[in-house]
Image (spheres, rainbow, N blue to C red):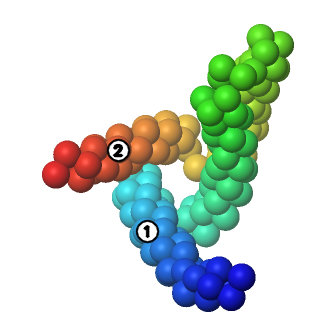
Amino acid sequence: MNTKTTLIALLCPLFMFSQNILDKKREKIEIEKIAYITKSLDLSSEEAQVFWPLYNKYSDKKNEINKKRIKEFAKVKDNRSSLTEKEIGSIIDKQLKMEQEILDLKVNYNKEFQKVISNTQISKLYHAELEFRKKLLRRISKRNRS
């Protein structure tokens, strides 16, 4: 028992350190995303002051839904052979419901964005989000090939 406790005590800082590294990477990516979107939208300082808190709420809610979707997808992926047709159907229904939640969120926030920025800027926002995601995926893919 004493050996297990010692081992856990030694490994715990390593887990905390690795979590800290992941948090820093996420933070760096988020900063890059903000810079990319800011440049794409060409926001005035007045627009930016109102837009960014609104966008951050939107992004947080979207990320929350996506995390739930990923958990549901993992349930099917990890247990496909042991789940019944009914259980898999229920998970699919939950996934579709969450996709609808994201769509509803986009529709609602699109109305809010229109109060702050122009439709042209909103269009640029959606395009910038997509392009940033593609850019990030290419970078990750490139790193994995190396």
Frontmost residue, 32 versus 116: 32
Q: Which amino acid, mark 2?
A: Leu
Frontmost residue, 107 versus 118: 107
Frontmost residue, 139 versus 107: 139
| Residue, disc 1 | 25
Is residue 29 rendered to the left or right of residue 110?
A: left
Q: Which amino acid, mark 1?
A: Lys
Q: Is residue 72 visible?
A: yes
Rendering coords of residue 146 (x, y %): 16, 51
Rendering coords of residue 67 (x, y %): 67, 46
Q: Does label 2 or label 1 sit earlier along the sequence?
A: 1
Is residue 90 rendered to the left or right of residue 52?
A: right
The residue at the point 81 percent across, 20 percent down is: 87
Q: Gap between marks 2 and 1, in whole Å?
A: 14 Å
Tell me: residue 127, above or below residue 33. above
Tell me: residue 63, above or below residue 126. below
Tell me: residue 53, above or below residue 127. below
The residue at the point 66 percent across, 20 percent down is: 81
The residue at the point 26 percent across, 49 percent down is: 144
Frontmost residue, 57 versus 137: 137
Rendering coords of residue 142 (x, y %): 21, 47
| Residue, disc 2 | 137
Q: Residues within 10 Å of mark 2 (few under 14, many from 20)?
A: few
- Badge 1 marks a residue whose secondary structure is helix
- Badge 2 marks a residue whose secondary structure is helix
Rendering coords of residue 133 (x, y %): 41, 44
Residue, far top: 85
Q: Locate the N terminus by quadrant.
A: bottom right
